[in-house]
Image: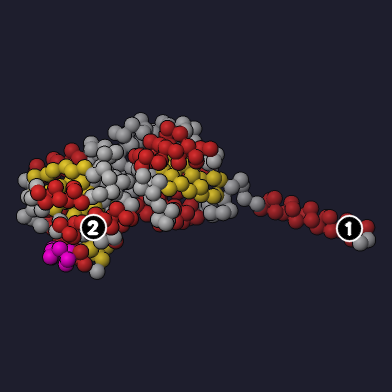
Amino acid sequence: MRRRDIILSLAATMLSRAAFAQNAPAKVARIGFLQNSTASDLGRRDAFAAGMLERGFEEGRDFLLVMRFADGHLDRLPALAAELVQERVGVIVAAGGAAVRAAQQATKEIPIVVPIIGDPVAGGYVSSLAHPGGNVTALSMNNSDISAKRLQLLRELSPGIARVVALGEPSMALESGWNEVRSAAQSLGVELRYVEISTDDFEPAFAFARSERAEAMIVLPTAFFNLKSRRVRLADLSLKYGFPTIYEEKSYVQDGGLMSYGPDFLEMYRQSAAHVAKILKGAKPADLPFEQPNKYVLAINLRTAKALGISIPQTLLVRADEVLD
């Protein structure tokens, strides 16, 4: 190659590199994703990625997700959170009290964005919703009011219901919604019993509920139950024992549950991307107030209602956001 051609080729290469550098994205952010679910349950991950794209952050170009799944075993979360810290992620997205607690124990410096949690103040994760003051922020839902509303919806479904069992599990904070459910039960004249499930064998709890002559169930909000295999198991046992059951979120209804009322979890993940985007642009989580969910959903499964021999009142059907046939 002639000297002139070599010089022109080098000049073209340098110009090309300069143009790339000018248009190249900033350093790709590594975002840790700490979840109680399984690797096959990617709906929330996809919702978060969509929320990031809406704010100008494209996966693969501007950020990478480092995924860690506990497969429904909450005791695995601390080790998984420690792994994310070792991976040097810039932000950790952690849903639910157990995941947030594990992330906080693993780091006091890395921002933790919470798509789903009840009352983070009562749980001791932040000092206040308006001024979190630490490394945790994002969305919180008032489980207290919502839990009471679910009991009211059960009573609207069947005004004659007099005995209801509330299902929970050991790691949940009973004060998150329990007092309000109990207060609502008293005002409605409903006898309410709490039954705890600590293993994947749910049937003894249902058998106990039958022995107590329960007429319906309310599943209290906890990450333990919100795993697809457990949602399906709850729905199957509710049918087997003939209990009308209400849950916290529409995924339970999509997996065979009768009725749910609460925030749209996928929308909460999408909404939480706004906090991550602000943090990646330099904001501090301590200065980002917690927000409330944008969307609440009443969902009803008509097929399950038919299997239970229940006729859904028209007053509920017209208010339902989603009705599954």
Q: Position of residue 1 (x, y in %)?
A: 91, 62
**Residue 40 colored magenta?**
no
Residue pictured at 27% horizontal, 45% vertical: 199
Numbered disc 1: secondary structure: helix
First in residue order: circle 2 vs circle 1:
1
Q: Is residue 5 left or right of residue 218?
A: right
Query: What residue does disc 2 label?
Result: 235
Residue pictured at 23% horizontal, 36% vertical: 175
Give the crowd class for mark 1: few <14, some 14-19, many >=20 residues within 10 Å: few
Nearer to us in this view, 314 or 307: 307
Query: What residue does disc 1 label?
Result: 6
Amino acid type, label 2: Ala
Amino acid type, label 1: Ile
Nearer to us in this view, 117 or 101: 101
Residue 188 visible, this angle: no
Q: Position of residue 27 (x, y in %)?
A: 61, 45
Nearer to us in this view, 207 or 62: 207
Give the residues drawn in magenta, as a range. Answer: 305-314
The label shown at residue 297 is none
Residue pictured at 31% horizontal, 46% vertical: 224
**Residue 312 colored magenta?**
yes
State how many labels appear: 2
